[in-house]
């Protein structure tokens, strides 16, 4: 069996008990793959929540180098930080304008996504005070019912369209609720409504597709596509590759007898005399507690199941069938890899991979490969 690459551990502090290995070449490959599916559209990048937990300070410059010039984040503080990394990119703030934040958008050259008439009025007033047209995007709710102009607000906007004369509407957008399901009738229903709305703004770019929307076909692509999870391979498509591995340190190896129990609540009882390894990460590090008695580790080709409840700082695996020379105090095991992907783990506990990727804690070191 092949050992871990030397750089993966030698660059870590000796006290490290867990680390994430993030393959930046894979992220660049995924971006190029998505852009290739958009021959007539611009491929932007959604990097909210610290680039889905993968580290925006490293990921954003890589994507810019690949030619990405348009970025979306959720909140203003994310946009301010992203501007410190990227001087020339266009950065949209999906949550729009909170009261008293108008000057920050101008100071950091950020573009608000306006989601209701209150935001339109705030940005219009700011434009009048600045005596210049200010850029914005308009977000129309076509069925998600989360944010954006609903039917009543849309009517109000069209009745007050004069307010927009002092603004530069760069983009009109909406968000698909079911693009992960290529057969969902909601996709076409939303697209048809968006098609009607976008024609009221002929000079603005149109944006509808997220990662799943890209795979729905050209009619969903419009001018700008907004992939997020696909950049990191968190979408089941044969052309996209997961970029993450999670390693945990073995803190202790011990034996326990048949009939004894493991962990809080004694949820696992040993069916044989066993050798157990305690790992130095738990749910506080983002290894989800719901993986208790469901997850598994890989030790140089040998599978070792998670047994008992995952606790805040520790996880126990059964290494009875792992050669003794491969499992020892201070050694490393893989908890996420090509076999146990985040999508695989998420499905096993009925959640989504993004919940897992954004949950990795600060105790985990990050290595960018």
Image (cartoon, rainbow, N blue to C red):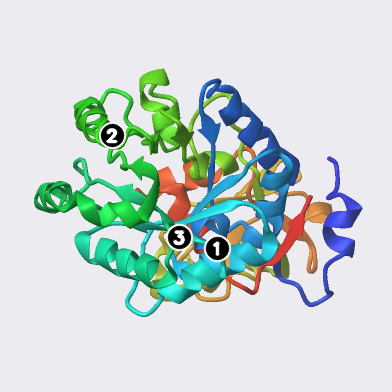
Residue 292 shows which numbered tag? 3
Q: Is residue 49 left or right of residue 69?
A: left
Residue 109 shows in the view = yes
Q: Is residue 96 left or right of residue 328?
A: left
Of labels 2 and 3, the one closer to you: 2
Q: Upstream in the sequence, badge 2 or badge 3?
A: 2
Secondary element at tag 2: helix
Work out how far the residue at label 2 is from the one at label 1, CA to CA, in angstroms. 25 Å
Work out how far the residue at label 1 is from the one at label 3, CA to CA, in angstroms. 46 Å
Work out how far the residue at label 2 is from the one at label 3, CA to CA, in angstroms. 48 Å
What is the crowding at mark 3: few (fewer than 14 residues within 10 Å), some, or many (at least 20)? many
Q: Upstream in the sequence, badge 2 or badge 1?
A: 1
Give coordinates of residue 26: x percent, y percent: 70, 38
Q: Which residue is mark 1?
A: 109
Residue 272 shows in the view = no
Of labels 1 and 3, the one closer to you: 1
Q: Nearer the viewer, residue 12 or 149?
A: 149
Query: Could you tell me which residue is drawn at 38 percent across and 35 percent down?
Result: 203
Give coordinates of residue 326: x percent, y percent: 80, 53
Give coordinates of residue 46: x percent, y percent: 51, 49
Q: Assign the N terminus to one quadrant of the image.
A: top right
Query: Could you tell me which residue is drawn at 28 percent across and 53 percent down?
Result: 164
Residue furthest to the bottom in view is 100
Q: Nearer the viewer, residue 336 or 180?
A: 180
Q: Which residue is mark 2?
A: 198
What is the crowding at mark 1: few (fewer than 14 residues within 10 Å), some, or many (at least 20)? some
Q: Nearer the viewer, residue 327 or 201?
A: 201
Query: Could you tell me which residue is drawn at 28 percent across and 41 percent down?
Result: 177
């Amino acid at each position: 069996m092949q050992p871990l690459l030397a750089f993966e551990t030698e660059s870590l502090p000796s006290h490290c008990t867990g680390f994430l290995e993030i393959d930046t070449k894979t992220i660049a490959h995924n971006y190029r793959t998505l852009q290739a599916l958009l021959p007539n559209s611009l491929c932007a990048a959604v990097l909210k929540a610290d680039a889905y937990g993968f580290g925006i300070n490293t990921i954003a410059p890589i994507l810019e180098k690949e030619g990405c010039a348009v970025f979306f984040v959720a909140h203003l503080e994310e946009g301010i930080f992203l501007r410190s990394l990227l001087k020339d990119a266009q950065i949209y703030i999906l949550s729009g304008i909170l009261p008293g934040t108008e000057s920050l958008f101008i100071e950091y050259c950020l573009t608000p996504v306006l989601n209701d008439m209150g935001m339109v009025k705030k940005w219009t007033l700011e434009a009048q005070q600045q005596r210049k047209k200010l850029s914005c995007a308009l977000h129309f709710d076509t069925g998600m019912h989360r944010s954006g102009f609903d039917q009543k607000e849309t009517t109000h906007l069209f009745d007050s369209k004069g307010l927009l004369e002092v603004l530069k509407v760069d983009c009109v957008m909406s968000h698909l609720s079911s693009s992960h399901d290529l057969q969902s009738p909601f996709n076409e229903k939303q697209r048809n409504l968006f098609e009607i709305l976008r024609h009221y703004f002929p000079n603005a770019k149109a944006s509808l597709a997220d990662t799943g929307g890209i795979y729905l076909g050209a009619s969903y692509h419009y001018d700008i596509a907004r992939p997020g999870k696909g950049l990191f391979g968190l979408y089941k498509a044969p052309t996209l590759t997961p970029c993450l591995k999670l390693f945990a340190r073995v803190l202790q190896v011990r034996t326990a007898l048949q009939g004894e129990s493991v962990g809080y609540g004694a949820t696992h009882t040993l069916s044989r005399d066993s050798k157990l390894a305690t790992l130095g990460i738990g749910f506080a590090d983002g290894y989800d507690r719901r993986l208790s008695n469901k997850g598994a580790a890989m030790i140089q080709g040998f599978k070792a199941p998670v047994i008992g409840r995952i606790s805040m700082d520790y996880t126990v695996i059964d290494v009875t069938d792992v050669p003794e020379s491969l499992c020892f105090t201070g050694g490393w095991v893989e908890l996420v890899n090509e076999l146990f992907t985040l999508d695989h783990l998420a499905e096993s506990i009925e959640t989504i991979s993004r919940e897992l990727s954004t949950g990795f804690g600060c105790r985990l070191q990050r290595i960018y490969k």
